[in-house]
Amino acid sequence: MRLKTDSTPLFTLLLILFFGLQAVNASQIDKTLFPVPEVLKPNVEFWKKIYAFYSEKEVVIHDSKELNLVYEVINLDSLFKGVSVSTRIQWKKIDRIKKDYAAILNKLARKKNIDITKLSGKEKRVATLFANSLSASKLRTAAKQIRAQSGLRERFREGLVRSGLYQNKMQEIFQLFLLEIKLIFLIKELSLVLHFIINLLSRS
């Protein structure tokens, strides 16, 4: 499936922040050097799941600004009942699903008083996500911010495996120049992140 991503500095910052920190033992990190503001934690958690949990066969339908606001995780095999279809057809179906959620949000925004207990199906599930802020303006804004993100677990794993081919040589070089060996893992992770960022942005 064609990958979608936001080409913003924040996206890049979050990825480098997360994967850089994962390369070093947490107990040895000076957290003042790599602070994770409370407001960014939901975004960091989202990308952790995209790279480490969700597979390429899964697509996360979510809010483009509030990344922890997830409407649905779609399994492509289940969606197409195991039938092999082209990437174009897959994405057209995903786009229709996104439009369905936008329609639900706009419908809810038109209601004067929303009683979640009287709703059903997707409407109830979506309204529940906004239970603490069911305002018309909030719902209309959310309807314009729906995006889809494919899982990247397999691609990231492949990158890690490939990077391991050069580890012994890198250790020799670092030892030669009396550099801390742990830095190898930090460099590897950051180089992988930059590779994926360039790859994703070229597809967006």
Image (cartoon, rainbow, N blue to C red):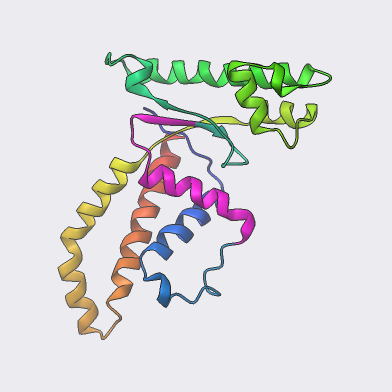
Magenta part of the chain: 37-60
Residue 173 falls inside the magenta stretch? no
* Residue at left offset 27%, top offset 16%: 84
Q: Nearer the viewer, residue 20 or 55?
A: 55
Quarter occupied by the N terminus: top left
Could you say which quadrant of the image residue 103 lies in?
top right
Tell me if 35 is positioned left or right of 89 in this view. Answer: right
Q: Is the magenta region chiefly helix, strand or loop?
A: helix
* Residue at left offset 32%, top offset 14%: 81
Q: Position of residue 54 (x, y in %)?
A: 38, 38
Q: How many marks?
A: 0
Q: Is residue 90 above or below residue 203?
A: above
Residue occupying the far bottom of the picture: 178
Q: Nearer the viewer, residue 150 or 195?
A: 150
Q: Position of residue 96 (x, y in %)?
A: 52, 15
Q: Position of residue 110 (x, y in %)?
A: 78, 17
Could you say which quadrant of the image residue 41 lies in?
bottom right
Tell me if 141 is positioned left or right of 60 in this view. Answer: right
Q: Is residue 152 above or below residue 110?
A: below
